[in-house]
Amino acid sequence: MHPALRSRLALAALFAAPFAHAQDAPPARPAQSELGRAFSNASQEIQDVLNAQGPLARNLDRLGSFQHTPATAGMLKAVIGNERPWSFERRADGPGYRWTLQPLRYTTPEGGLLEWSDMAVDLTLDKTGRQLAYAGAWPLVSFEDRHMRMTMRDASLKASQRRGPGTLWYGDVQGGADSVEVEARGDGAVTLQMRDLWLRSSVQERGANLAIIQSFGIGHIEVAGEQIDGFTLAYRLDRLSKASAVALGEAERRSRLARQAGNTDTDLLLPMLRELVRAAAKNKTALKVDELSVSYHGQKALLRGSVGVNGAAEADLKDMRALARRIDARFEVRVPLALVREIAAAVVRKQAQARAASGGKAADAALPSADNMTDLMVGKLLGNGYAKLENDTLVSTIVFRQGQLRVNGKTIDLPTPGQKAPQQQQQQQQQQRQPFALQSFMQARRVSDSCTLPAYPAAVVDGDAPLRLALRYTVDAQGGLRDLRVAQASAYPDYDAALLAAFASCRFMPALRNGKPVEHNDTFTLVREPGSTQP
């Protein structure tokens, strides 16, 4: 999130959250859009008071008697019958202030029902008058109509922030919700349940620059009868120019005021956006994705990488295609084979259930097995060069540089709008001429639960020392293991011998070429992760 929007999150994110959901429910409803705009304007006007120049304590005191602009007050009055559906006052039971959003029960003209419980946010200034801490809770928000139902329960937010220049606030924010449930109704009826939602956000001042660190996660997801163990997104924006962020925040404020006045000119932000890109190129600002992961049945798919702007010239800022060529991005995707098989098993299970529901046999021989489907998916990725296999994990490296996209070093021709890439056309023509089985190769695979590798030496664990070794071996067409040897020894000969003995007891699936088992030479590389005791 851009720093110019950070301070809004502090007081207004929960305040405005349900309206975005309500506006997205099909079909679009003008009344709900008016409701969303009314509360969006109200929350921004509250934030403008906090951002005003002068002592923060004085700004907080102003909120006690603050009245919205006539336009915003009129919108609130027309939609919910109340020009000021919140209160702000000094706490009688201690230092600080309490901001309270009143309960709402609102019926749309189409019969939809939006309601929420009251929300209270307690705010406290430190002795210096510069550091603002606050904590809030919102027990219930729900929306329901004939198309969908959404319910959020026990949301919370707490933070400690210091006001910076313009609309910037430095500090930390964390929040979450106990559960969010969404039910889509009608022909495509489906229920999505999410539990243990959380977010963490930090804006740090580093000289003339900023670092923005964000993370978001869901502890448990249930959809279409499937259980997903968790979802995590964590990223950082490093070396963002503070001056450019302040200028962009001010430009955004002027643009918002212009829109409220009826001016729909969209060019107000463009000069500042160009300045932000110019500063990003100069500072080598980078967006780093530390983790984007999904866990399913104990197996985790993981993406990591970064995106930056490399050497953008003045002319590039006026041409989006030229600017795109300055984007420098690199990502690595890691997917365990066990996860691929779990997904394949779920697909086969759903197919069998659908076949049984339609009167067919659940165990119809025409349905592929989970192993066959796994081999099909994995073989296609490996055979086409889009992934490689490392210790029972599919690994893909995606690089976009100088306008070219490469996956595992293989160039992917990007199509122009409305056209297919030449490489894509060639692949489709080849696939039409030959069945998939004649184009694929899949490496031999160790059955991970067929053997147990020894724990790391005590000296390595106690000292949290690194350990790396590699084994070289051959898997024949029947899945037999032979010619096993140490290709790269570690500093612990006894452990190398123990690992070699344990590995010799493992079972393997043979490599497949053109759909047929073949002999295959391979390498197993063991690299100890810090803090681990077992491979």
Image (spheres, rainbow, N blue to C red):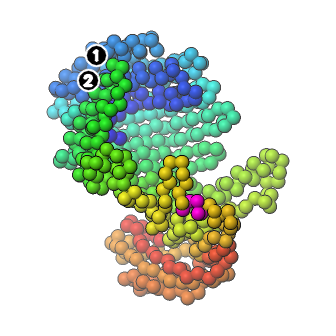
Q: With respect to residue 466, does 406 lie above or below?
A: above
The residue under the point 46% across, 20% down is: 34
Q: Residue at x 44, y 24 (%)?
A: 36
Magenta stretch: includes residue 426: yes
| Left or right of residue 126: residue 223 | right
Query: Along the horizontal axis of the image, is 21 left or right of 467?
Result: right
Element on which disc 2 rests: helix
Residue depicted at x 46% and y 76%? 525
> Residue 329: x, y in percent?
38, 57
Q: Is the C-beta separation of discs 1 and 2 under 8 Å? A: yes
Residue 240 in percent (x, y) is at 26, 47
Q: Which residues are magenta?
A: 423-427
Q: Foreground residue, 238 or 96?
A: 238
Image quadrant holding the N terminus, namely top left
- The secondary structure type at the circle numbered 1 is loop
In magenta stretch: residue 352: no
Residue at image position (46%, 14%) is: 79
In this orientation, does residue 451 appear?
Answer: yes
Q: Which sits earlier in the primary sequence, circle 1 or circle 2?
A: 2
Determine crowd level at label 2: few under 14, some 14-19, many 20+ residues with C-alpha closer than 10 A. Answer: some
**For mark 1, does the 10 Å Cα neighbourhood hold few (<14), some (14 to 19), or many (20 or more) residues?**
some
Kindly tell me whether residue 3 is visible in this rendering.
no
**Residue 505 sits above or below residue 3 on the image:** below
Q: Which mark is residue 66?
A: 1
Residue 196 picture location, percent across and down = 48, 42
Measuring from the top left, give residue 91's x and y in whole percent.
29, 21
Amino acid of disc 2: Val
Nearer to us in this view, 462 or 340: 340
Q: Is residue 516 above or below residue 25?
A: below
> Which disc number belongs to residue 49?
2
Question: In the image shown, does 45 or 416 lie closer to the viewer?
Answer: 416
